[in-house]
Image (cartoon, helix red, strand yellow):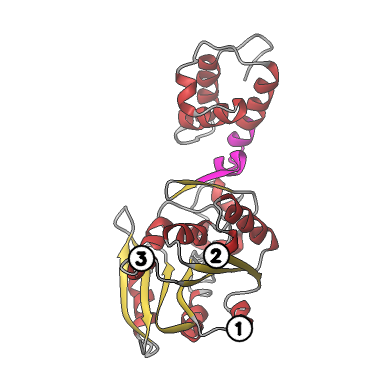
Amino acid sequence: MAGERSWTVLELLTEATSYLEGRGIESARVNAEVLLGHALGWRRVELYTRFDRHVEPAALATFRDLVRRRRARVPLQYITGAVEFHSRTFAIREGVFIPRPETEVLVEKAIEPFRGGVGSPVRVAEIGVGSGVVLVTILLECPAATGVGTDVSAAALALARENAERHAVADRVEFVEGSLLEPLAGLGGDGFDLLIVNPPYLTEAILATLDPEVREHEPRAALVAGPNGFEALRPLVADAWRFLRPGGVLAFEIGETQGAEALALVAGRREYRDATLSKDYAGRDRVIVARRAGG
């Protein structure tokens, strides 16, 4: 990409953009800007005010390595170690699922029933907490809430704790290792007000159509759920009500083609009521919310 001569910020951005475009990277210029800003320790806006600044050799070497990794289709978030969610910045690492913008809809719909009771305590459980982004966001949006996050991955739980500490909610959350709902059985109490899940819901066929960033780098267990995408969701719906208080809320994300079947899965059970289907910002089926019957 570059020789040993001195390079300005603008020259590097131009060269890196072309280099990334040659590998089919979408938004190559934005990627180049993010990576150069990361290498220099600058915000992206600072690049525009320093186009003619020459880049020091150490930062240049770092930038070259970052661009090569991105050209190999390593996700940008894994390279920078950061992901934006709900207007906040969280840590992310390889081996942990990268939160998507559409999951912000899951958060909004999940906490909507509690908006009227500002300051009232809410007990929240997230199954498959991953990076902790969803649960931490809920705790930030609901200052009186406390939470429990479960995951089968010790690495994910460590990252979730890091993000809880980063956003100063660590004293209101507990992280427990285990599969699906199993860890909640030993926590006691009279149930949760909110149980939220972003389960794996892709099929192998759909995964095969996705970009290399997803199918080659993100954890498959967080993406794929059997031949029809419901392998994780069915047992969750069958038993989640046992861990909810009467009137408690179950909220989960679904694939864009799963709306009708997922809604029927919940609405067909007597343990739930008021099941609704919501769409994401692109108008695609994305979130199911229901209440436990009896409240």
- Residue 124, percent from left and from top: 49, 71
Query: In the image, what residue type sits under mark 1?
Result: Ala
Among the two numbered marks 1 and 2 on one chain, the one whose residue lies closer to the N terminus: 1
Q: Residue at 65%, 73% (x, y): give it.
A: 178
The N terminus sits in image quarter: top right
Q: Is residue 236 above or below residue 211?
A: below
Residue 244 as seen in the image, left or right of residue 64:
left
Q: Which mark is residue 224?
A: 2
Residue marked by disc 1: 185
The x, y position of residue 154, in whole percent, is: 69, 63
Q: Is residue 228 visible?
A: no
Q: Is residue 3 visible?
A: yes
- Of residues 72 and 29, which is closer to you in this image? 29
- Quickly name the residue at label 3: 118
> How far from the left and from the top, in percent, is residue 63?
63, 26
Percent x, y of residue 175:
63, 67
Circle 3 SS class: loop
Considering the numbered disc 1 on the image, is that residue within a helix, a strand or a loop? helix
